[in-house]
Amino acid sequence: MGKVVLGVAVGVAVAACTVAALVVGRRVRSRRKWKRVVGVLKELEESCETTVGRLKQVVDAMAVEMHAGLASEGGSKLKMLLTFVDNLPSGSEKGIFYALDLGGTNFRVLRVELGGQRSDLDPDVEQQPIPEQLMTGRSEDLFDFIASSLYQFVEKNDSVQSPITKLLGFTFSFPVKQTSVSSGVLIKWTKGFAIRDMVEKEVAGALQQALTRKGLNMRVSVLVNDTVGTLALGHYHDADTVAAVIIGTGTNACYWERTDAIIKCQGLLTTSGGMVVNMEWGNFWSSHLPRTSYDIKLDAESPNPNDQGFEKMISGMYLGDIVRRVILRMSEESDVFGPVSSRLYLPFTLRTPLMAAMHEDDSPELTQVARILKDVLDIPDIPLKARKLVVKICDVVTRRAARLAAAGIVGILKKIGRDGSGGITGGRSRSDIKMRRTAVAVEGSLYTQYTMFREYLHEALNEILGEDIARHVVIIVTEDGSGTGAALLAASHSSENVNNIQLI
């Protein structure tokens, strides 16, 4: 009997040891898997590192590329396009001005009444969808349709038979080679448009002919892009505005430059002595940018590899997809997110607004993170520590983007001597320089709607410039530069201000 009891006890002990060994084994394997995931996160953090020293290198690189782009065509990744806009709104403009914003499958028409003294802006706005057949048909049909819509819009508020010529600002968000403040040649269509007879033709002229055919006494007085419109809107509200940045789905910047600094166009004369330059900064590149393996793969798989490198690191189009790629790699190296979801292999499944919602989830259990992972990426029921990991990934990617955007802004300020470093020689300190108040107009959902992005950008501006200089730099949020800004430019380039630019 004793032998039986002993045998049973031994058997139980063996079984217990076996179970214990299995449990320990699982824990060891779990720790190893978690360690691999943490290793991926650490690698991401190191690759995305944006120390102040590195950001200052990006600032210098941006300023150097700006100089090169102004010196010669093709001399830089930055196109530094001349806009021929040499007169920004001052706030003293009076009258009624119109704008047309064409940049996608819808277009908008606006009417702005200005009373001088920086009067409040309350534009009348109408939006119209463009019939699909007009996006691939003849240019005459498209512009006749737009002219008819403009005619009906004017008719609601003003006399279409008035002998006074109405002025129109035209925002045309497609690649254009600008030839004057009110003309430009279409380089190519994007966004689903494919009207062949318009390529390499003058855009504003085609619209002007349609307005004439319709019998509408209206002149296209400026042809601009949305970034230039944002600068105009910022300058209308604040005369210290010297640059504008759009940080939304895409990104771009423009700024006010002295004409004598535009070397590639020697003999350029403006009565104001300056001109707005459209940087097309999304194409900026420097070896100092902190690039990861995820950026390299995203670029290689994009429709435009080796193009728009800066935009792919900082704009809303791409941030969510970088996060998706990191989660995919973690899923492939560990089961911390469960079986690898097939949705993780689909590019742009995770949009940046959803990424921002996860990043800013402040609920104790990160319920928003859990919901988005389940509904969008088909990753259900993951533990809280894995959800926290996702928030950290979002934070690393967003922080890098915002800090690089800040470095880009300071690069512009450095180029025009507004960063507090101009004229410093040995022995002089920054405090010796009298810093002028400087405003930068910013528009775009990534900045205006994503709190963490905005806070990281401001933090980086302070770190790069130093608090003494940074307090002189003001960020102005604008809304609808592409519409209202274009109308304001029509006002600032009205009859008394046109023909300011000469080539000698």
Image (cartoon, rainbow, N blue to C red):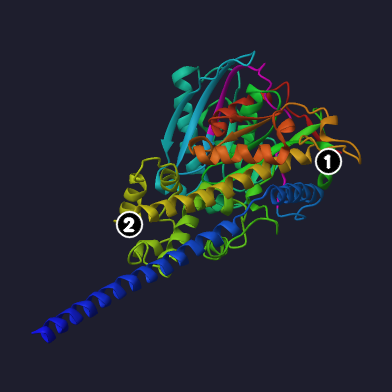
Compare residues 275 and 459 and report the one nearer the observer.
459
Q: What residue type is labelled 2?
A: Ile
Farthest-out residue, bottom: 3
SS at circle 2: loop
Q: Is-magenta flag for residue 283? A: no
Residue 403 quadrant: top right
Write the residue at 36% across / 46% down: 366
Q: In which quarter of the image is the C terminus?
A: top right
Q: Residue 408, relative to residue 269: is it above or below? A: below
Write the residue at 77% across / 55% down: 75
Labels 2, 1: front one: 2
| Residue picked out by circle 2 | 382
Residue 469 quadrant: top right
Please report the bounds of the magenta region as a residue range.
78-100
First in sequence: mark 2 or mark 1?
1
Q: In which quarter of the image is the N terminus?
A: bottom left
Write the residue at 50% across / 50% down: 317
Q: Residue 73, relative to residue 37: is it above or below? A: above
| Residue picked out by circle 1 | 261
Compare residues 102 and 453 and report the one nearer the observer.
453
Coordinates of residue 395 in the picture (x, y in percent): 51, 48
Q: Does the residue at mark 2 contact the one at mark 1 (Cβ under 8 Å)? A: no
Coordinates of residue 283 in the picture (x, y in percent): 65, 53
Report if residue 413 is visible in the image: yes
